[in-house]
Amino acid sequence: MSPRVVWTSVFADGSGGGNPCPVVFDADGVPDDHLQSVAAQFGAETVFVLPPRSGGDTRLRYFVPAHEMEMCVHATIAASVLLGRAGRLPEGYATIESPLGPLGVTWDAQSAVVDQFPPVFGAELGDLSWVAAALRIVPHRIAGTVRAVSTARAKLMVPLPSEAAVDALEPDYPMVWDVCDRLDVTGIYAYTVRAEAADIAARQFPRRAGYVEDPATGVAAAALAAHLAAGSAEPGWHAWRIAQGRAMRRPSLLVAEAHVDSSGAVDAVRVGGTAHEEEPDARRL
């Protein structure tokens, strides 16, 4: 069977919003270099649907234009919703094989929630001058703890005082990539808790992805939920509605949740949102 592409938009917050994601079905046997060239051609994070190998319900691989990724939440949501609608997943809940390992996905016909891995927290950064320089702001504009957090792929959490401050960022991208290399993270996630019509407003600047910003970043949102929930005195689930993509004119809305156990540790994280077909495409690869 020849591969087939369906274009989706994930996490859209209104018309024209969301993160565009091509979902490529029946890609088994396609060489890796061709998978990479397809993602480069599309200019977007692209997910390839493959037969499972380790007892899961399906297997996914993720490519940005510049390289393969280990995990992509919005692509997992897009593929899960489409596979579920087509009757190719168990009803309501599925196990997805990813390069990082198995992931639980709760899905319906319009949305999905993707379980993440237990969080890993980096040390709080003391000297913020080089992070501020990469974002082209003065260090005192950074409004809280800066550290790397990972629930799948590590992101650097950088709090700012307002949504206007987040929107005004004009980073030095080579410096951003150098910061990412130095800290072994895959992007900088600038955010504020002073957001309009959301709990958080954020922007994500990835490391050498083939583009300099994306409209919605599930792995970063999940990492932020863990970052904010860590040390909370209140056990249970904590949720945040995170607006992203507004500065790109592709408004997106993600819901990220972190569970705090009785000791105050974060022991589970998940992130979810909507997916819809944006531009179904019957082109063969």
Image (cartoon, rainbow, N blue to C red):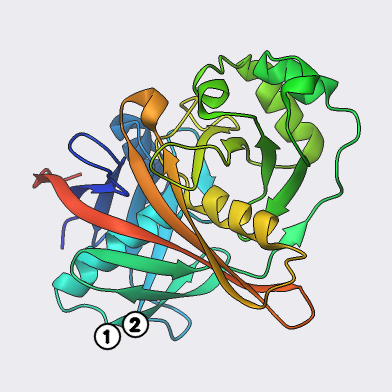
Image quadrant holding the N terminus, namely bottom left
Residue 124 image point, x, y percent:
85, 45
Circle 2 residue: 93
Q: Amino acid at mark 1?
A: Pro
Looking at the picture, tell me which residue is in the foreground, 27 or 257.
Answer: 257
Kind of element beneath mark 1: loop
Q: Which mark is residue 199?
A: none
In the image, is 280 to the left or to the right of 238?
Answer: left
Looking at the picture, tell me which residue is in the foreground, 276 or 98.
Answer: 276
| Distance CA(mark 2)–CA(mark 1) | 6 Å
Question: Does residue 195 lie above or below 109 as drawn?
Answer: above
Residue 28 visible? The answer is no
Residue 42 visible? The answer is yes
Question: Does residue 115 lie above or below 12 as drawn?
Answer: below
Count how many numbered circles sit on residues in the image: 2
Kind of element beneath mark 2: strand
Q: Are marks 2 and 1 in contact (CB under 8 Å)?
A: yes
Circle 1 residue: 90
Q: Amino acid at mark 2?
A: Tyr
Residue 241 image point, x, y percent:
44, 53
Image quadrant holding the C terminus, namely top left
Task: Say which residue appears at 57% left-offset and 22% top-offset.
Answer: 165
Question: Does residue 243 lie above or below 150 as drawn?
Answer: above
Residue 278 image point, x, y percent:
15, 44
